[in-house]
Amino acid sequence: MLRIMKQPMIIVAALCIACTACAQRDMTNVVPYPGTTKPSMPALQTYSDTDFGFSFAYPSGAKVLNECGPGLIPCGNFVLMTDTYDNSPFTLAIDDGTIYEDREFATEYKNIMVSAKTYAERLHWQNLAEKDPTSPFYNKNVANKTVGPLEKIRFAGQEAYSFHMTEAFAMIGFEQMTGGYLFTPPSDFIILKHDGRIFVLRLSTGDGVAGIVSGNFTFL
């Protein structure tokens, strides 16, 4: 169950709001990381996680951090380290796909399961709202960030949703109207649902290592 985070992790939720229209983009036969050509790498190794059922290739010498530790399903937060934490080319957050239904004047919150489309639309909207001076969620510290359109794509053989963003990635809890931010390099976000869980991937735009990871990301 997704709950509020007040530290720099990328497990996210967003607010109930009208759906944002999604553009259609077929990437069935295209390397699923836009704008990046796979560079030649000296050697690759594979990271596999049987708890969550995924694997990906990455350059030897890099390190994969699991910030939640083993056996803490549904919590999953993975960071690929090639240099510093803040410059990581790839991060992956996994959620159990449930959120709190936000109901005005409610005495209790109803736990609901959502689709990848709904999850992506709410996440996309939240980041757009931070740029809008008329929104109660406007944040002048990140008002200059760019949030691209939400698109429907194919990733790892599955339907997914993607958008591009610079600077800061919003993390907002469904129970409270407060949250935190993770400042990142310009990145592409991919949201999909697999085996009942929501996967949120962040890939640094134009980064060769991120291109390798996305081009070799598979479900077990």
Image: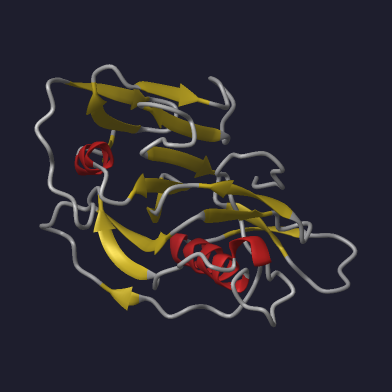
For the N terminus, the quadrant is: top right
* 133 over 121 or under it: above or below: below
Task: Point out residue 112 in the picture as x, y percentages from the top left corner.
Answer: 64, 59
Numbered circles on residues, count? 0
Percent across and percent down for residue 74 are 57, 36
- As drawn, 220 above or below 189: above
Q: Is residue 23 above or below residue 10?
A: below
Q: Nearer the viewer, residue 15 or 165?
A: 165
Q: Quadrant of the C terminus?
A: top left
- Viewer-nearest residue: 218 or 183: 183
Which residue is located at x 68 percent, y 66 percent? 139
Q: In front here: 4 or 105? A: 4
| 105 relative position to 157: left or right | right
Q: Is residue 202 left or right of residue 207?
A: right
Colouring: secondary structure
Does 181 sit left or right of 152 as displayed? right
Q: Residue at x 40, y 23 (%)?
A: 64
Q: Residue 9 sits in which quadrant?
A: top right
x, y percent for residue 107:
90, 64
Residue 188, quarter of picture: bottom left
Location of residue 123 (image quadrant): bottom right
Q: Residue at x 71, y 58 (%)?
A: 174
**Which residue appears at 19% of the width and 43% of the height?**
215
Question: Residue lying furthest top in this view?
Answer: 61
Residue 25 or residue 165, whichever sits in front: 165
Name the spot of residue 26 as percent of width and height, x first.
19, 67
